Image (cartoon, helix red, strand yellow):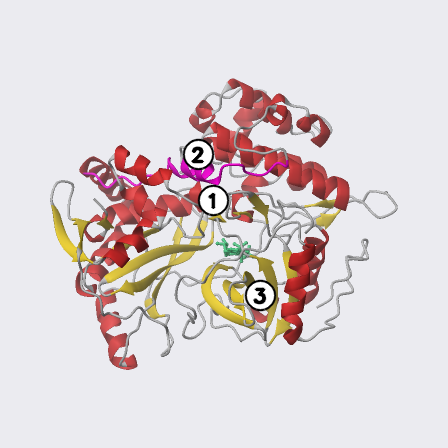
Amino acid sequence: MELNSDLDRDSGALDATPKRQNNEIYKIIENSMRSSVLEVSRIHLLTVLVVFQVGMDDSGASEDVPPVGGLLMGETLGQGAFGCVKSASLEVDKNIVVAVKFIHMPTCNENGLQERDIMREVVLHNKCSQHPNVLRLIDCNTVDDYIYIILEMADGGDLFDKIEPDLGVDLLITQFYFQQLVNVITYLHEQCGVAHRDIKPENILLDKSGNLKLADFGLASQFKRKDGTWKRSMDQRGSPPYLAPEILYSKKPYYANVTDIWSIGIFTFVLITGAIPWELPAWEDVNYSSFLENDGNVDMGPWKRVDIQQLSLLRKILQQDPSERITLSKLRSHPWFTQKNKLMNSKGLCNDPAALANRLLSRLNVSLDNGNYNTSLTQTLDSATRSVSPPLPTVSTQPVYNDVAYIQTDSLPNDQRYPNTQRPSSQYYALHDELNYYSTQVDDTLLKYMENDYSTLQFQSQQNIRDKSLNALQFRPFKLTKFYSLEPMENLLPILEKALQLSGIKVTPDLYRFYQELLEKKNEDVFPLKINMKNFDSRGGKLVGFISIRRVKADLKSLEFVRKSGDPLEWRRLFKKIALFSRDIILIVK
Ligand SMILES: Nc1ncnc2c1ncn2[C@@H]1O[C@H](COP(=O)(O)OP(=O)(O)OP(=O)(O)O)[C@@H](O)[C@H]1O
């Protein structure tokens, strides 16, 4: 699809007409790569090539997407509210890998989104694609019920996945991403006249060197016209904790670019503390009102983790009155921006990806010890007697879901599987309880497979082993809300079911029986399996996602917790809780 970036700015109408056939994709990607500021990632497809879901899930959007000419669809990288994102390689050169975002139009329509809304997003994203910190948009077209968008592959995965709740990331890393974010927002505002309007860790991906890649232009708007005149916004959209107060309460139109500066402040706070400062910038929110009453001098809760230099910066950014808020150019002369970051080169990109990965991931930890287990169990039993708080009113549109977790197969008959031919040799240990491990035998390929996946490190309680392995780290797109297990399904599923229940998730009883029924029905391997999950987080926000159980090889299975919507910090908190209650089935390398 050729993209015409000439928006009719007052009506929001858009001229974006499909003008090309799919078989030209290679040419487009090739040209796009040639003209690209960045090289599109060239990695080999590592894992299962085609993973299709059987049937639709209850959001209406399916992972079973139609084929796209010129592309070989790969694994599912993630799921959003309206579709999924898959890796794909070019038919003519399988080493060229891109990400393809499929947007299921009927689901969008049911939720009030029209094709022109999606095209508006695509046009603005395309307009802003010439910066190394913007996820590059390569092409867009339609196939069956879907609009698909071909994007640069973000090899480093999600940033949100790497933030430890209630700890955050270290200051050098926070400053690194703060500086990259200010750079890219400067480009958007000053060169494109576009405000992003949805800056939050969920919309930031990483490349293979750990550089920030701004994504999701779904709420972006053109605030400056070609003739230099400005346009103000009136609508109330965005993610509640990241919203600037004028979006919520101002009766007057507001400048969308100034709201981006506010969101930079919240983003920075989340990186420093691993928590959001408030749920809404509203007087009714006690955290926000106490921030205002104390003129930003707060020293409680997560604010205790903010030191004096960053507090002074945040106070300048988080000014309720937009005219008092620090401007982008003043932000660029603030010492925290001008101070050289030792991980950044003169072009503003990472100069030492291994050191960045090491520092970023070193705080991720899931403690499975008895103390933590008993505390969580007590809290769970206590809270079972209290009712769940109702969800907050939210200004974003999300589909409605059923609430009970159930199991389904996610496989195709021709699903590519690891052959079960090699004999075990290396030693592995599954955690049984804090003191008693039992060993089992797994082969060297598996050892390599797991060592490459840094999600395994988060369970490692011995700091020296963690440090040693962290030194060899590289950025990879693996999700970190994940663990491995060697347990047979008759042990794994009942323990997981209990863990889900203890974590407050409603589950269809006897997952193992359903698994057996699936086996009988399909009369073949049913992996990957999918367990849908819905829950309210501790603040009443809705969390939606699923557990994908894949058979890696022989008895080794991976259990990946994939978030579809909801606060990512809360998703990781939930994952840690389920992992703790599932500790008897988690495999850790010792
Ligand atoms: N270009 C990409 N490279 C690698 N992974 C990606 C890419 N784009 C998306 N993903 C993965 O897919 C997930 C879902 O992406 P998507 O943009 O649909 O999510 P979302 O923003 O949560 O969805 P929504 O559009 O409903 O807000 C991301 O969290 C990420 O893990």
How many numbered circles are shown? 3
Q: Is residue 227 left or right of residue 589?
A: right
Q: Which residue appears at 60% of the width and 43% of the height?
A: 199
Residue indicated by mark 2: 168
Q: What segment carries the magenta color?
A: 347-369
Contact? badges 2 and 1 (CB < 8 Å): no
Q: Is residue 255 left or right of residue 463?
A: right
Q: Tell me if the residue at label 3 has its CB under 8 Å from ligand 1.
A: yes
Residue 346 on image: x %, y %: 63, 33
- Camera-nearest residue between 425 and 24: 425
The answer to whether residue 141 of the structure is visible from this angle is: no
Q: Indicate the amino acid at tag 3.
A: Ile
Residue indicated by mark 1: 160
Q: Which residue appears at 34% of the width and 70% of the height?
A: 408
Residue indicated by mark 3: 103
Residue 124 on image: x %, y %: 71, 54
Residue 576 counted in the magenta span: no
Q: Distance between the residues labelled 2 and 1?
A: 10 Å
Residue 424 on image: x %, y %: 18, 60
Per the image, label 1 sits on a secondary structure element best described as helix
Q: Tell me if the residue at label 1 has its CB under 8 Å from ligand 1.
A: yes
Q: In which quarter of the image is the N terminus?
A: bottom right
- Camera-nearest residue between 149 and 576: 149
Residue 465, located in which quarter of the rendered image?
top left
